[in-house]
Every structure is written in structure tokens, then in C-alpha cells.
Image: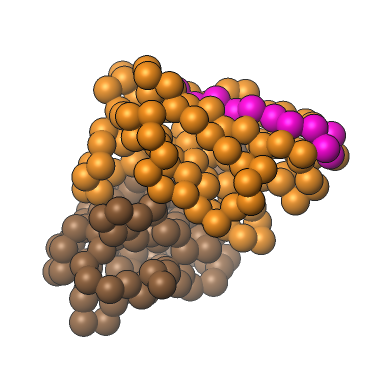
Amino acid sequence: GNSVTQMEGPVTLSEEAFLTINCTYTATGYPSLFWYVQYPGEGLQLLLKATKADDKGSNKGFEATYRKETTSFHLEKGSVQVSDSAVYFCALIKAGTALIFGKGTTLSVSS
Amino acid sequence: KAGVTQTPRYLIKTRGQQVTLSCSPISGHRSVSWYQQTPGQGLQFLFEYFSETQRNKGNFPGRFSGRQFSNSRSEMNVSTLELGDSALYLCASSLGQQINYGYTFGSGTRLTVV
């Protein structure tokens, strides 16, 4: 079946460091891919998405490229801030199915 | 534009009781999905409704049920609560059936079963 695998956390970084959170997926065909972020005590917010191979989603300095050949959608940011501390979820969806999420990666950024 | 509203935010129930959670989607959105979030299992899909019809269902026991009203508001019900039902229940709304519409999530209802 369809699934999403994320790197285990927590990820601890200093402010202005480079961030990479790995995400790989298993799915037939061409799913749409998403990154969601969850701040403490809140629901999920869509961070970025990509709907076809080689698409790059970007938002608030975060980027991820849909790589069909490696079935990956890694999240990157060039310079993290303390305010980026949150839990990040990679997810996929195919027509007729629900969103499938990875387990989430906790990011902690210190000043 | 108002977001997805879930009520109540917090609930404490006793094992064996039943509970009803409510979700009001963004105005104009006709699709509502429910997810359960726990530390151990992560985010798991419960069910999805579109225009008052359940169009997708996750792998949960029959104690979990839902419905959607003509104004797109949705409720989910859990009967005979178990300790393991303690979780954050998230609702998400979407314009319709096209997957690229994307989903907007509410802040969730935190259910604690004691």
C-alpha cells in the first residue's frame, strides 16, 4: 500500500543553520506530495506541495522537490529561525484516497 | 475568512461513555475529513464526507462514526470509549474531490478518556 517514511527526530539546530528533513514515499502512479507543519497546541498547516514529478514547492524559505526517480520529497531551508521550531509532516495523496502522513519530525531551533 | 472550527477544544470523558465532536468547515468547502493523532500511531485517517455522503473510511472499529449535514458541518461520534481513544482529533476541510484543492485543518479536539 501507499506509505510515507520520514527521518526520525528530533532534529536540533542552531539558528541560521541549514535544515534538511528526509521524506521518501511508496505509491503506485503519481501521488501529490505535501509538507505540513504543526506548532504546539495547534492543528496542521500546509507548508508546501508538489503535484507532479520535478515540481518544486516553496513557502516561507522552505523548499522541497518531487523526485520520482528516488521517490523522495525532502524538505530544506537555508537558514532556520527559532520560530521554525515545530513538528513537520510529509504526506501524500492519490485520487480516491485520504492523505497519508509520515510519523512527523520534531525540529528544535535554539538561538 | 474563518478557518476550520472544531468544538470543543478539550474533553475529558470516562471509559464506556460516548462523545460527539463537531467540525465546521471553511465556508464553501464541501469535503470534511477526520483524523486521529496519537504519539504512538501518528496521524490516522478516520473518514471523509462529501456532500453528506461518506466517500472514504479508514481502518477503525464501528464505535467510530460520523456524519455530515447539508451545511457541510460534520460530527464524529465515538461510543463506548476506551482509554486508547485518548487522542487529538483533527478535522480538515476541502473545496471538493480534486486532490489538488488541498486540505485546511482545524486546531483539533483533545479527548482524554479516564
Q: Percent position (x, y) of residue B112? A: 75, 38
Of residues A9 and A15, the one nearer the viewer is A9
Asked if residue A110 shows in the view, the reply is no
Q: Percent position (x, y) of residue B110? A: 66, 36
Specify the chain shown as brown: A
- Magenta span includes B16: yes
Specify the chain shown as orange: B
- Magenta span includes B15: yes
**Quick check: B52 above or below B70?**
below
Of residues A59 and A28, the one nearer the viewer is A28
Of residues A56 and A80, the one nearer the viewer is A56
Asked if residue B50 shows in the view, the reply is yes
Residues in magenta, as a range:
B14-24
Q: Which residue sits at x=25%, y=63%?
A: A31
Q: Percent position (x, y) of residue A16? A: 39, 59
Q: Percent position (x, y) of residue B45? A: 49, 51
Image quarter (top left, top right, bottom left or bottom right) of the C terminus of chain B: top right
Q: Is B14 on the left or on the right of A2, as rendered? A: right
